Image (cartoon, helix red, strand yellow):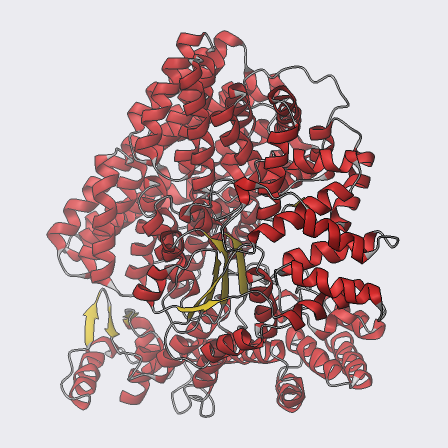
């Protein structure tokens, strides 16, 4: 009996097992009348057998055993398999394989063999077997992803035979057979599975198995490298990001240079770095045009397979003729490449640097930092671990990196004469003879600079009739640009090459080339070039083709061009020499006007209801993108648009700075990194302040406050939002006032200043009504409803949500019509009217009439999950919560992600998956970090509840008290009542009846005041438990009867204990 008792306690280790379940297990389903007292004896004997251990603890009507993973193989298996899954999600494949193999090595026969098969033991054994199969599946998928298909066929076949109805295992076996060149066996396996399913179950194979069958039949080339995690979705190759994963594997190296000659010694020095145990950092130094980037990219491609977790490349623009990339902007780009959401990128350099180091921890990556300006620019981008190799290129010696970080400096000298001749011979393909010999002399005049050699070769190749001897004379006799000449340096020769190339192209190409030197951003398109030159796009493309052929412009991606930094400097100088100030201003004005028109058109497509400044009328052919095309254009031009705002702020026209930043406000909110968005608006503020333009300043302050909210710097956002509202009022921009007040509502809500937020909301609502702006009224009504709901003023919240819904109908706004219904459903759920809430959700789809609206499915599924959870429909709740999670990639804001994750966590907790729930709550808490106070409190209460159900009472008590303090202080009364419920349960389990009674009574009173009937019902139930523990049976029955009646009235079920 002691064996059975120990078995059932271990099956629920860390949780209290009720006496009834213990009795059934110990006496094999037939407990005697004296079971309760007899159990005490058996527990005493078991404690003595365990060495007098106190780890078997009494609890409410049962017992709990506490063990560690080192003592109990089930916990160790769970710990290792969970670790393997996390490592897989973090794309640490080798570590994940090791963890899963160690987990599976713990198995010996059937789980809980030798223990009497009570319902609890049978269920736990089935769960463990399912977990074993899950871990085996994860391991097979990881090994398939790394190419172990040959070795897996036999073991996969055995597992599929043991689990004939497991379709994913069957699909994996088909994939392994196909990759092992056993296509016929893969097809036969499918036919066997299909026959079994049809014969035994009367069903056809599922979609995954059918897709795999069709792909094998077709010989689909994607089968060779499809990532197993994407088999049920996008069939993404292993080398690319796995959908739903948390970290990408970046492959960012530019194309390897063609015709690479020389540099054998430098390559060998870099190779030696691969053998070092320290954090390897190499610095390639040398003058402009010496070939630093070409060597870095050539070597990086050569060793790319040594860095399986990715190769990153970023141009730090240290010598690009404009402002060097700030460390914070470089970190934002690097973190974005690692799939860190824009809103998760800190604005502080040290914090962003720490986050970058965390993201690359344990990953073997190659990081190329090209064109660095200084050691200070590079330091925040360094990792420090031995897994990553950092390769820096710079014209500076970067002695600070050598002294402080042990960087290895590799100084590049000009190419040897024979290598220069070999390169130009390879590029020109001239046959042996006088021309080839003249080309060799040209190579010598290029001073061993690869860029100069390539330009000279392009000139010779572009004009077949050009005599290399004549070209040689032109180079030798060319005027040197005194401002670019450096004594005792071959730099002068490259200027002669530029001059020669420039004079050799037609006048229209020369004009476009020099105008391109005025583009402030990192690249440009043919459309941008056409605006600069005031020509057609077709003509601009033709001229760009000529410039690309002459190696004066680089077409580095389809449709996108850029200038080498030295060529940019040369183009800028030619512009100053050959274009009047008026012509230069007209050219940049045309480019900026086009940027403004396109950005405004994109805003109209993506956020037509957002308040904005009026823009000048566009008299040419209009850009009218679809929402998808608008998002794509903005993503492509983001760097150019930010640069245009900064350039206009500094050099004019000043109005472009605030008009363009205002047009980008919606995009900056949803798609820009925090540093980019803040920088954009700060430049606009500076321009408006210098120009004394109050309207422009109001708009820029409005944009900055929104960007700060996005970056979760809410207190600072309130400061700038107040200033925006004041300036808008002074400028007579009423809707700007309203927009600023709406921003302030969100900022106040995030940090728990709810009453202050309501004051701002009422101001915004009054202004919107004065202007007759119905859609903006909906925004404000929505925010006010949520604030009142958080305060526990649920009936007032319902009134605002109803007004939101009705106003949206009047405005013909489908989105807010649906959102209003969803909000009403949420508040009716809190009021305990589950039927009404369900009706509202059902009406949502009808209101949309089949038209998709961004944001709708996310909220619909989330609230539907809560309704199903309250009604006890756990499977449907889980399905809805997971559908809401699936919508998250479209909505990168942390507040929404926290809320959605917490909803799924609550469902998983109710289903008994307490550890998974705690992991999800941890993720939500990590996202909120108390900057979004509502979501932090919600997740903290949820985690405390899951910990309580798992028997982690001390942790649960700490978390619930941490949540109660800000909930009470900020008047989040709905959460205050929930927190008190949890605290009362915990105090009761810890045998502190007086504290439990105090918190239970307070929770009941508060939940009745707010009208939060779901929480009230739970409070009644808790009070019943407290009264019973105090020996007040009549009081316990009364409270429980009230709770039962209230649950029945609502159509809800009590939450599990």
Instruction: Tell me, yes or no, if residue 221 can be seen here.
Output: yes
Instruction: Kindly give the residue lying farthest to the left in the view shown.
Output: 994
Q: Nearer the viewer, residue 542 or 871?
A: 542
Task: Give percent across and percent down for residue 665.
Answer: 52, 29
**Residue 534 in which image quadrant:** top right
**Residue 759 in which image quadrant:** top left
**Residue 427 in which image quadrant:** bottom right
Task: Give percent across and percent down for residue 1030.
Answer: 14, 55
Task: Give percent across and percent down for residue 900.
Answer: 47, 48
Q: Nearer the viewer, residue 158 or 890?
A: 890
Instruction: Kindly give the residue lying farthest to the right in the view shown.
Output: 465
Whether residue 649 sits left or right of residue 432 in the image: it is left
Above or below 1052: residue 679: above
Which residue corresponds to the image point at 36% horizontal and 57% vertical from the top-left? 379
Task: Give percent across and percent down for residue 917.
Answer: 40, 60
Instruction: Tell me, yes or no, if residue 799 can be seen here.
Output: no
């Amino acid at each position: 009996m002691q064996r059975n008792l120990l078995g059932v306690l271990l099956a629920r280790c860390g949780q209290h097992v009720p006496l009834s379940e213990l009795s059934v297990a110990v006496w094999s389903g037939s407990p005697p009348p004296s079971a309760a007292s007899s159990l005490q004896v058996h527990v005493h004997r078991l404690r003595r057998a365990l060495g007098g251990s106190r780890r078997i603890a009494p609890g409410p009507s049962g017992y709990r055993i506490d063990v560690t993973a080192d003592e109990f193989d089930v916990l160790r298996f769970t710990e290792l398999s969970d670790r393997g899954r996390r490592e897989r999600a973090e794309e640490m494949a080798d570590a994940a394989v090791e963890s899963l193999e160690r987990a599976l090595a713990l198995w010996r026969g059937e789980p809980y063999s030798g223990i009497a098969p009570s319902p609890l033991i049978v269920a736990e054994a089935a769960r463990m077997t399912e977990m074993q199969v899950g871990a085996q599946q994860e391991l097979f998928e990881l090994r398939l992803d790394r190419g172990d298909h040959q070795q897996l066929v036999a073991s996969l076949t055995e597992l599929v035979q043991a689990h004939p109805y497991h379709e994913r295992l069957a699909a994996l076996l088909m994939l392994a057979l196909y990759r092992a060149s056993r296509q016929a066996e893969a097809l036969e396996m499918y036919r066997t599975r299909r026959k079994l399913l049809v014969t035994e179950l009367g069903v056809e194979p599922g979609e995954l198995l059918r897709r795999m069958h069709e792909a094998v039949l077709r010989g689909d080339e994607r089968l060779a490298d499809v990532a197993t995690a994407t088999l049920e979705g996008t069939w993404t190759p292993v080398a690319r990001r796995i959908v739903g994963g948390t970290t990408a594997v970046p492959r960012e190296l530019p194309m390897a240079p063609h015709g690479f000659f020389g540099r054998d010694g430098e390559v060998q020095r870099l190779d030696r770095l691969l053998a070092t145990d320290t954090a390897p950092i190499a610095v390639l130094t040398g003058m402009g045009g010496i070939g630093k980037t070409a060597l870095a990219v050539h070597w990086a491609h050569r060793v790319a397979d040594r860095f399986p977790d990715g190769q990153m490349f970023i141009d730090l623009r240290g010598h690009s003729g404009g402002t060097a990339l700030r460390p914070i902007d470089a970190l934002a780009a690097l973190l974005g490449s690692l799939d860190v959401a824009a809103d998760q990128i800190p604005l502080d350099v040290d914090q962003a640097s720490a986050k970058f180091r965390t993201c690359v921890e344990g990953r073997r990556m190659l990081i190329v930092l090209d064109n660095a300006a200084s050691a200070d620019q590079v330091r925040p981008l360094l990792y420090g671990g031995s897994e990553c190799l950092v390769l820096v290129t710079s014209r500076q010696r970067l002695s600070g990196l050598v002294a402080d970080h042990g960087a290895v400096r590799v100084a590049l000298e000009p190419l040897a004469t024979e290598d220069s001749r070999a390169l130009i011979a390879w590029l020109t393909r001239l046959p042996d003879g006088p021309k080839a010999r003249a080309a060799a002399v040209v190579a010598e005049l290029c001073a061993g600079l690869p860029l100069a050699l390539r330009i000279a070769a392009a000139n010779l190749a572009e004009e077949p009739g050009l005599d290399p001897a004549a070209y040689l004379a032109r180079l030798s006799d060319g005027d040197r640009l005194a401002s670019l000449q450096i004594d005792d340096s071959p730099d002068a020769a490259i200027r002669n090459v530029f001059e020669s190339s420039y004079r050799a192209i037609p006048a229209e190409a020369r004009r476009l080339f020099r105008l391109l030197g005025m583009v402030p951003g990192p690249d440009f398109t043919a459309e941008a070039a056409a605006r600069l030159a005031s020509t057609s796009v077709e003509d601009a493309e033709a001229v760009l083709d000529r410039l690309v052929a002459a190696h004066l412009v680089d077409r580095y991606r389809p449709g996108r061009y850029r200038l080498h930094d030295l060529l940019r400097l040369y183009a800028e100088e030619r512009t100053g020499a050959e274009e009047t100030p008026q012509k230069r201003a007209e050219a940049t004005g045309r480019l900026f006007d086009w940027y403004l028109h396109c950005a405004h058109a994109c805003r109209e497509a993506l956020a037509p209801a957002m308040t904005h400044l009026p823009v000048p009328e566009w008299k040419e052919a209009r850009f009218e993108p679809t929402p998808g095309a608008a998002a794509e254009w903005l993503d492509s031009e983001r760097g150019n648009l930010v640069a245009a705002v900064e350039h206009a702020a500094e050099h004019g026209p000043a109005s472009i700075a605030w008009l363009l930043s205002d047009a980008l406000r919606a995009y900056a909110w949803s798609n820009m990194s925090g540093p980019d968005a803040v920088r954009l608006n700060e430049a606009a503020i500076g321009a408006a302040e210098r120009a004394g333009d109050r309207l422009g300043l109001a708009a820029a302050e409005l944009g900055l406050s929104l960007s700060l909210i996005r970056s979760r710097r809410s207190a600072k956002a309130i400061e700038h939002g107040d200033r925006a509202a004041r300036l808008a009022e002074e400028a007579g921009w009423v809707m700007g006032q309203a927009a600023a007040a709406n921003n302030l509502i969100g900022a106040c809500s995030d940090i728990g200043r709810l009453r202050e937020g309501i004051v701002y909301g009422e101001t915004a609502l009054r202004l919107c009504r004065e202007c007759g702006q119905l859609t903006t009224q909906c925004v404000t009504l929505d925010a006010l409803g949520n604030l009142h709901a958080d305060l526990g003023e649920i009936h007032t919240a319902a009134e605002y949500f109803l007004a939101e819904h009705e106003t949206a109908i009047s405005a013909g706004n489908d989105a807010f019509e649906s959102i209003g219904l969803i909000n009403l459903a949420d508040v009716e759920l809190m009021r305990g009217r589950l039927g009404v809430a369900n009706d509202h959700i059902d009406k949502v789809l009808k209101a949309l009439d089949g038209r998709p609206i961004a944001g709708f499915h996310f909220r619909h599924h989330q609230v539907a999950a809560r309704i199903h959870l309250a009604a006890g429909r756990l499977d449907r709740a889980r399905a809805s919560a997971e559908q809401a999670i699936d919508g998250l990639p479209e909505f990168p804001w942390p507040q929404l992600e926290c809320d959605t994750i917490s909803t799924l966590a609550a469902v998983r907790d109710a289903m008994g998956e307490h550890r998974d729930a705690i992991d999800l709550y941890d993720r939500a808490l990590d996202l909120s970090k108390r900057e979004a106070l509502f979501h932090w409190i919600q997740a903290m209460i949820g985690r405390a509840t899951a910990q309580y159900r798992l028997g982690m009472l001390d942790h649960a008590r700490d978390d619930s008290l941490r949540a109660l303090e800000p909930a009470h202080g900020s008047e989040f009364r709905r959460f205050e009542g929930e927190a008190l419920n949890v605290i009362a349960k915990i105090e009761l389990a810890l045998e502190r009846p007086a504290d439990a009674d105090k918190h239970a009574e307070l929770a009941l009173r508060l939940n009745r005041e707010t009208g939060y009937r779901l929480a009230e019902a739970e409070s009644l139930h808790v009070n019943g438990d407290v009264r019973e523990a105090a020996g007040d049976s009549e009081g316990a029955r009364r409270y429980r009867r009230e709770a039962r009646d209230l649950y029945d009235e609502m159509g809800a079920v009590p939450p599990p204990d």
